[in-house]
Image (tube, helix red, strand yellow):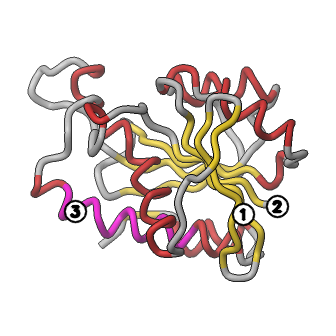
Amino acid sequence: MKCIVGLGNIGKRYERTRHNIGFEVIDYLLDQHQTTLDKQKFRGAYTIARMNGEKVMLIEPLTLMNLSGEAVGPLMDYYNIEIEDLLVLYDDLDLAQGQVRLRQKGSAGGHNGMKSIIAHIGTSDFKRIRIGIDRPTNGMSVPDYVLQKFSDVEMKTMQPVIEHVARAVEAFIDGETFENVMTQYNGEVQ
């Protein structure tokens, strides 16, 4: 079973913020497949659904971002999910808005949600999709910036990115090699 994790902060005040772009992709996939996060366990909201004929678990941690591993690690253990079946979706300050970068493995790169997942599953050798949100340019602090809502104009840019990432996730679910998925979906979304 594939396991797709979107990172974000739980709660209404964090909806549509830059830090919640991982949740946005999960929500889009749920909508496209007419399902919901109908289960809660180990500090995670999740569903196990059939997507394109494949069994898939979609997870949104119910923790704050920095504690994401507290949901992901126990859910993976409970459902015996293999590391090679894990794909994590999250925001990246070091990529321009509209950029998408897929990787087979890597460091946390300063992202506290990823640090938490790595600590709880004991490895950084898992697939991820980094979604560019850019860095603040007006002197705003990084925490204030990532917790700021996308403007309406920015959401017009980000909606095609969300859909692009969802297509990459579906290609992974459909059994394409991750190398092929990377080749097709890495880069700037037009």
Categorize mark 1 by other alpha carbons within 10 Å: few (<14), some (14-19), many (20+).
Answer: some
Mark 1 touching mark 2, by CB under 8 A? yes
Residue range of the region highlighted in magenta in the rendering:
155-168
Which residue has dot 1 on it?
56
What's the magenta bit mostly, secondary-structure-wise? Answer: helix
Occupied quadrant, residue 17: top left
Helix, strand or loop at mark 3: helix
Q: Can residue 39 be seen in this snapshot?
A: yes
Which residue has dot 2 on it?
1
User: Which sits earlier in the primary sequence, circle 1 or circle 3?
Assistant: 1
On screen, residue 102 above or below 76: below
On screen, residue 58 above or below 61: below
Residue 144 rendering spot, x and y as whole percentages? 22, 22
Which residue has dot 3 on it?
157
Helix, strand or loop at mark 1: strand
User: Which sits earlier in the primary sequence, circle 1 or circle 2?
Assistant: 2
Marks 1 and 2, how far apart at CA: 5 Å
Helix, strand or loop at mark 2: loop
Question: In screen coordinates, is 150 left or right of 26?
Answer: left
Total numbered labels: 3
Q: Can residue 110 be seen in this snapshot?
A: no
